Every structure is written in C-alpha cells, then in structure tokens.
Amino acid sequence: MRLSVILALVFLIAPVSAGMVSLPDTAGIPGLFITSGNSDLNLPEARHIFRYNVGSGNWMAENAGQDTTIRVTVNGDITLTCRNGSFGMQLAAVGRDTRPVPANPGVIGADGRVLEIRRTGYTEWYLNRDDGIEQGMTLLARPEGDGRVQVLYGLSGDLTPSLEWQTLLFSGRDGPVFKYSGLIARDTAGRVLPTRMLLSGTVLTWEVDDTGARYPVTIDPMVTQAKILTSSDGKVEDHFGTSIDVSGDTVIVGAPNADIDSTDKGQAYVFSMNYGGTGNWGQIKILNASDGASGDCFGQSVAVDGSTAVVGGICAGSDHTGQVYVFYQDYLGANNWSEVKILTASDKAAGAYFGTSVDIEGTTVIVGAPHADAGAGSTNQGQAYLFSRDKGGLDTWGQVAILNASDRTFGDNFGKSVSISGVTAVIGADNTTVSGKTGQGKAYVFSKDMGGSGNWGQVTGLTAPDGEADAMFGNSVAVDGSTAVIGAFGSSVSGSNTGEAYVFSKDTGGLNNWGLVKNLTASDKMGGDRFGYAVAVSGIRAVVGAPVADSDAVSTGKAYLFSQNLDGADNWGQEQILQASDREESGLFGFSIAANGSTIVTGAENATVSGKIGQGKAYVFTTPAPTPTPRPDGGSDGPAPVQHVAKSPLQKTVSTISVNVGQIGRTPIVRVEVTGVEVKDTVITATEADGPGTGVPPPPGIVYEYVDVSPARFTEITDAKIVFVVPLSWIFEHYLTPQEIVLYHHDGKMWEALPTTLMEIRDGEAYYTAEGSGFSRFAITGQLNSTQPGQNVTPQRTVQILGDLAGATGTGTPGIKVSSTTSVPVVTGTTAPLAVLPSPDLPFATIALAVAAIVILAVGIFLIRRWWIRRQNPALFEK
C-alpha cells in the first residue's frame, strides 16, 4: 500500500545585483519545480544528468536552463545552489503529527535525470527537467497513529526561509532567490487530498489529511517531452504527422501531401533515437514509393516493427485503388531502409482505398480498404487483407486472407482502422448501423486459428453499450495482447463530438468474450474535443488523442494517458494530460498516436514550422514503464505472454545475421545475432516462459524472467549473441547493481552461466549482451556477485564503486555507455560508508615507478653486499 505526496516547488534565481525579484505566478503547477529568471532551455541536456563523484561520495546534477546545481550527499541530504546563495533540505521524520518517526537510512539510485532515495516505507525522488527540478515522495504504507500525515525537513544554508501563505521563500540580501510552493497529494482514485505547509524556525513540514484516502495511493513521475520531430525538407501543407508509429528506437511519420518534384506524391520519414547523439531522435531516412505519382497520398498510413516498415498510398494505382509498400532496414548499410515489395489486393477495384490503414506484427501485415467491395453483388462495405512474408516463397509477401464482417452492409467503412498483435486482429467499421443508429460504429475481432488451423476467423463484434448515432465507434482501434482500445470521437457525452474511448479485455466473462472493462473520457472533457480520434495501447497503458481539445480556451489538441492499475486493477484511471510544449492553435496535436513501452509519439499534422502552415510536427514523450500489479498466484495483471517472431531481411547467404525480435514490453529479448554455416532467412522466435521447466530446478540468484529463444532454418551454429534488457526499477528493488545481471542457458542437463556484458543504460533500462552456442530456455537473473552465483542478497548493503560515472555524449536524453573496465555506480548504499576501491587497471606511471623502485632496491642490495664481502675478504678481489 502506498501514499504518494508530490510537492510542487518553484525556485526563482535572482541576479546578484538585482533588487526584489518579481516572482512568477505558479498557481496550478503540479510537481516540485525549480525555475530561474536566467532560463535557457537550448543548453545541452547532458548537463542535467545526475553524476556520482567517487571522491566526495555525492551525487550532483546541473540545471543549465535554471542556473542551479542540485547535490545529494551519501546520507540523502539535498542542497540547491545558484549564484545568489544556497539552501539545504534534510529529511528528518515521516509519520503522524502525534507520532513522528525519525527518517531511516536508504539507498540512493540515479539513472540519467532521475534520482531516487529509497528508504523503508517510502521513497523520495527528483527529476531534473529542462524547465525545473520536480520532487516527489511516495509513502508505501499508511503511517501508524492518529492525526494528519507529516513529512518534516530540516532547512539549512545561507538563505533565510519565510512562509507567505503557502509559498516558502528563500531570501538573500537582495530579496527572494528561491520560491517553493504548490504542495499536492492524491490518492489512488485521483482524489486530491487536503495539504498545507508549516514552517517553524528551520523546520519545514508537509502536512496531508488522508482521511478516507483509498489505498494504495500513488502518483507516477511526470511524462516529459523528449523531442519535437520535423521533416528535413518540409513544405507548406505537407501534413507531416498524419500517421505515426513507433517500435523500439524507431519512429516512422507519414506526410501524405509532401511534395516531390513539385507534386504532392507523399513521403514517410524514419527517425532513430540515437542518430546524431544519444536520445537525439534524428531523421535517418526519407521513404518514397518507387512508382510514386502525384496525389498518391503515400504516407496516409504507416507502421513499423523492428526492421520492417509499411507505408500506405491509398490513392495509388488506377482510380484510387490503393497500394502498400514494404521497406526493410538493410543491416549491411546502416539506416538504408529500401523498398522490397508493393502489396495490392487480389480483388483490387477502383475507389477501394486499399492502404487507408495498415499495421505489422513480425511477418504479418494487415491492410484496411474501407470502400472495397465484399464479394459478388456487394458494394462498398469494406475489407481487410492479410499478407505473410513467406507466402509462396521467401520474402514474397503473399496475400493469405481477406477479412469481412459477418454482418456487413453497404457503407460500413470496415477497414477504416486496423491493428494486429500476435494472432489477434481488430478492425474498425465506424459507419456501421447498430440497432437502427446510423454511424454508431462497430469493431470486429479476428483470430488466426478460428475456423481451422491457420485460418483467420471472426471471434466477435464489439459495440459501445452507450452507443449513439454518428458516434463513429471504430474510427480508431488498437490492440496489444489481450487488451483492445476503440475510439468513438463522435460521442456526445458532454456535447457534440466530445468523444469517448472503450477498453475491452479478452476472456472477460468467458473464453474469447472480449468484454468491456472501462469507458474512458477526458477529465476536462468538452464538446468538440474529438477525444478518441486516435488511440494506442502498450502493456497496461493506453493513450487517447483529442486533436481539437482546448488549452487556455484555444483549440490546440491534447492526448490523455491512462494506466490500467491507477485506480485499482482494470480500472484504467487517467494518469496525465499530454500537451505540446509549443502548443499551437489548430495544430491538431493528438491527430495520430503511437505507443511502445516507455515511448509515446503523437502527431500534429496541421502544425506550423518556420512559418510554413500545415507542414506538421510529431512529439516524442518518455515515461517510466509501469510494473503490472502482482497477483496472489505470483503472476501479474499485465498482458499474457506473446510470441515474437523476426527474420533476417537479407536476400543472400551470409556468415552472420542480426535479427530484431522487438521489445514491446512483453519479452526482454531485443535482438539475436547468429553466426553459422548457413543462416540466411533465419527465423527467430522469442516466447516468455512460465518457469524453469518441469523437473528443472531454478538457476542461482534472483530470476527476473524465463524466456525461450528458438531459431530455425539454419544448419550449424558456431556462435550466438543475445541482446536483452532489464528495467532498472527491478534491479534497484532487489538491491542489485546493473553489473550483477547474468544470463543463464539450460542445455538440457544443467544451467550454464553465459558471459554477460552490460552495454548501455538509458531510459530507465539496462541493455546487455550474452554469448553462447545453444538455444532453448534462458533465465535472466540477478547475482549479488556475478563471480559467485547463488549468493544471497543482503538488503541495503554497501556497493563497491570501481570507477566514476562516465559523462554522456551528444545531446538529448543521455545514456551511460559502459566498457569492460568501467563500473557504473547506479546504486549506492547509505547505511554504511562507501568502500571506494582503486581501479584494477593501474596507470602506467604508477607501474613504472613501482618497477623503478624495485630495480633501485635490488641494485643497492647488490652493491652493499659486494662492499661487505670485499671488506671481509680483500684477497678475493686481488688480480
């Protein structure tokens, strides 16, 4: 059970020569916040990283935009410094006003901009943002006793604190330097709890009235905008951001009106997270149709999974028949992304708009054609088409099925939206008449094995229980594992076109029942918002776009983030409202939405760029991925294990291939590299496993996850490398360091520890490679000491630091690059002094001095001995 208290703190740093500073109005700003009158948000983000200093044992970060430094000691004391002074905060006690309990020792952990101090019963955290430092505290259990919850800090420093109403000012000789305000607390139902700040001398108290608070109570760290994406060759009315998708470190954005040779053929743009600098999200490729023509609308729909991308050109071909283009990322040429196939419908017809919607999962592509004719004598009902990579031969991308609604009628728009996950496909038909209500809309679920092995059959049809005419239910759909989200932007819940979205879950009320578990609406809903115009789902989070929603009485567009466990299991509570940092009237932020793990991307297809109206933008947000709530049986409420399949895109025999399996929050295996005699067109399957196997004991250490990895279509493996990822949150929770993760492989007889290397830490996750020669069951484990498997973990232990934290390179969200001789002090214990050890790689000068000393000593001993012998026996030295 947790109670989270988030403190909104705003600091203003005054110039040295300034008089009384005019403080900004901070009403309504949630979160602890640090701002400065000297703000420059264009300074390198790398300066915002929390770094560990081996000599002092402190953590430190700069906020370049606010001209502020934050320092955290090994005891968890906080100091904020600017050029006009500094103040410190030392957590003194947490409890009730009738029973304060002294603060206990904790464990400090940092990853990039986020620093946490974990103590028994509660966690204190700091997020170093471009526009300030956000502070929060999470109380893990209801404090004992009566009265209000209190958190007490001791204040220190050369600035004088004073409390004016609910604003704490830290002043110097020229007036206020820092401003601290906005204490906010919420329970798990989203209810705001009464709070106040008290100041008695140098003791600051946060006070929270948790009467009737629903436990567990939590506040998640704020989602932050990481990057604004624009096209390198953008022009007026390109509508970049009409469509969008994300897979791992890759984002693809469609611009269906982009000009090529002065004609609006359309383009798509590929961005990579680390191109041009860590976290930079740089543009790496512009995709064009090989047979592109004016008005094709290439880029009206896009999708990407691993190293394969698909782009829809809905008006391509004769009379708007429509085509879809498949692109591969060429591993022999970095970021090459070349066209390999053009997909068309086997029954293509004029005006079908094949490619209006597309999605891809592994080796399967689904395409929607909402105006296609569904069989002889049927017109304009809409269809969806499934293509498989190896239908009819390797890389032929042949059509394997045509999907139709069982109750199809004229003008349904079946195929207006499509989504696929594993063996499940969801297809929207937003103009379907339901119970006499025209345009209410419907969505259909299909499964691969319904009606026979390998056949795609209809499982069920989904409708809104509160459906109404022209609600457009099914205009947008998204599915991930056993969760589907359907948008209905025309719903009039609070006026015309307010919009709603609906969450359905598989097996709710029975096998393949796909029952409704939640009706989503915006917390600030208004008529005309078009909430539900775009939807996305990843794991236990859903994102809903409202491209016409108002911000400050201006129609800028918003997106809403929901979490499955925020208000209790399956309650899908609103977690946060996402907005563009440069929000623009009529920019249509939220027009398109994509989510994958901790990355959310939303398009604003009508945004203005450098005076070019309608060029369009896309916004990348990052957030810590939530952990599914544990069940009593030891499982979790997250999505069911899903199989991931990937294949080498190479068209010739090679000795080594690298295959992206795709990490989508469902398996930690990211990539597999295989070397062998014959490995072309290798298929790699990664599937989550429930345990070590029947009759097989678990491996040593603490198991993070079991995974089965199965390659096929090769004759002999000589070497294999597996790339996998482990969340830092899991590592910290088990009092481990990132260096103590080991991949084990079971060879049928016993568990073998594979050589495991920490490669990189970024976005709250640690990336590893492990080498072996066999496949089947693997176990990702944490070891207290990787050289001593099976050793028990001791909580709140002292971690030995072998080196300083290396600085990040480039700009953007920083990562930590790790070499074999560098240890990253991500977690440090504060219950005992740090054991600072010398580096095992001694400097050359030290070695040289040691050798010289030994030589001089040896020569001295030899000469002294020779002199002594000559003195005692002079005859020995006579000629």
Image (cartoon, rainbow, N blue to C red):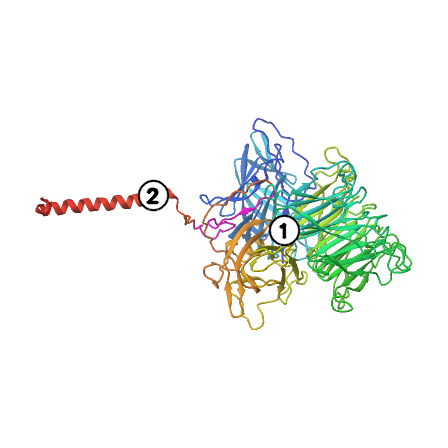
Side of 471 relative to 144 (left or right)? right
Instruction: From the top left corner, tell me how far across and down residue 432 is, in percent.
Output: 87, 56
817 inside magenta stretch: yes
- Of 545 and 233, nearer the camera is 233
In the rendering, at what x and y percent does residue 792 appear? 48, 62
The 10 Å Cα crowd at callout 1, few under 14, some 14 to 19, many 20 or more, is some
Q: How many marks?
A: 2
Residue at the far left: name it.
875
Vertical order, 299 against 720 (above or below): above
Left or right: 878 as drawn, with respect to 147 = left
Name the quarter where the N terminus is drawn: bottom right
Identify the residue position indicated by label 2 in the image: 848
Q: Is residue 878 magenta?
A: no
For mark 2, give the secondary structure.
Answer: helix
List x then y, in percent, for residue 766: 56, 52
The numbered mark at residue 12 is none
Q: What residue type is disc 1 on?
A: Pro
Which residue is more in the foreground, 375 or 873?
375
The image shows residue 868 at horizontal and vertical percentages of 14, 46
Q: Nearer the viewer, mark 1 or mark 2?
A: 2
User: Where are the magenta residues, as a range?
Assistant: 812-835
Q: Which mark is residue 624?
A: 1
In the structure shown, which secondary structural element does the residue marked by tag 1 occupy?
A: loop
Q: Residue at x 51, y 63 (%)?
A: 701
Residue most extreme to the bottom: 695
Q: Does 21 sit left or right of 740 as displayed?
A: right
Q: CA distance from mark 1 to mark 2?
A: 48 Å
Q: Quadrant of residue 520?
A: bottom right
Q: Amino acid at mark 2?
A: Ala
